[in-house]
Image: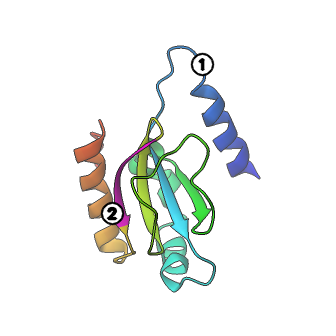
Amino acid sequence: MMRRFFLSLLMLMTLLPGFAAAAELVMIERKGCQYCIAWKEEIGPAYPNTEMGKFAPLRIIDIADAPPEGIVFQRPAVFTPTFILVEDGQELGRIEGYPGDNFFWGMLEMMLRAKTGYEGTG
C-alpha cells in the first residue's frame, strides 16, 4: 500500500511544471518464475535503499499485462524477469533474465550510466 502511494505521488509530481520525468526500472515478472523470486529475495529488499534504486525506482508488472499507461517498450518482453529502463515514457535499455546479484548490480549500473544522467557511486 505504501509503495502504491509513493508511486502515485511520484507520478503526480511529474505533472508539476518544471519537474522532469525521472528514470524508472520496470520489472516484468511471471507468477512462479524462479528467477523472479530469486531477484525479489536477493535484490528486492535492498534495491529501493540504493543510489540506483533511488535514481530509477522500481515498478513490477506481470508479463501478461500491457505496458503501464504512458510507457512505450521497444518490443514485448519474452523472458522473465526482464528489467526495462524507462525515462520520459520511452524504453532506454533492458536486462533480460536475472544473472545473479553480482552481475545484476554491475549490468544495471552500466546501463544507467550509458543511458541516463546517473553519476552515482553504485
Q: Residues within 10 Å of mark 2 (few under 14, many from 20)?
A: some
Q: Which residue is mark 1?
A: 16
Identify which amino acid the numbered label 1 is placed on: Leu
Please report the bounds of the magenta region as a residue range.
90-95
Separation of residues labelled 2 and 1 (CA atoms):
32 Å
Kindly identify the residue that appears in the image at 41 percent across and 59 percent down.
75
User: Which mark is first along the chain, 1 or 2?
Assistant: 1
**Left or right of residue 7: residue 75:** left
Would you place residue 92 above or below residue 100 in this image?
A: above
The disc placed on residue 27 is: none
Based on the picture, tell me whether residue 92 belongs to the magenta stretch: yes
Q: Which one is nearer the viewer's eye here, 33 or 41?
A: 33
Write down the quadrant of residue 30 in the picture.
bottom right
Based on the picture, tell me whether residue 65 belongs to the magenta stretch: no
Q: Which residue is mark 2?
A: 105
SS for callout 1: loop
Would you place residue 49 above or below residue 98 in this image?
A: above
Kindly identify the residue that appears in the image at 27 percent across and 44 percent down.
115
Identify which amino acid the numbered label 2 is placed on: Trp
Question: Comparing marks 2 and 1, which lies closer to the viewer?
Answer: 1
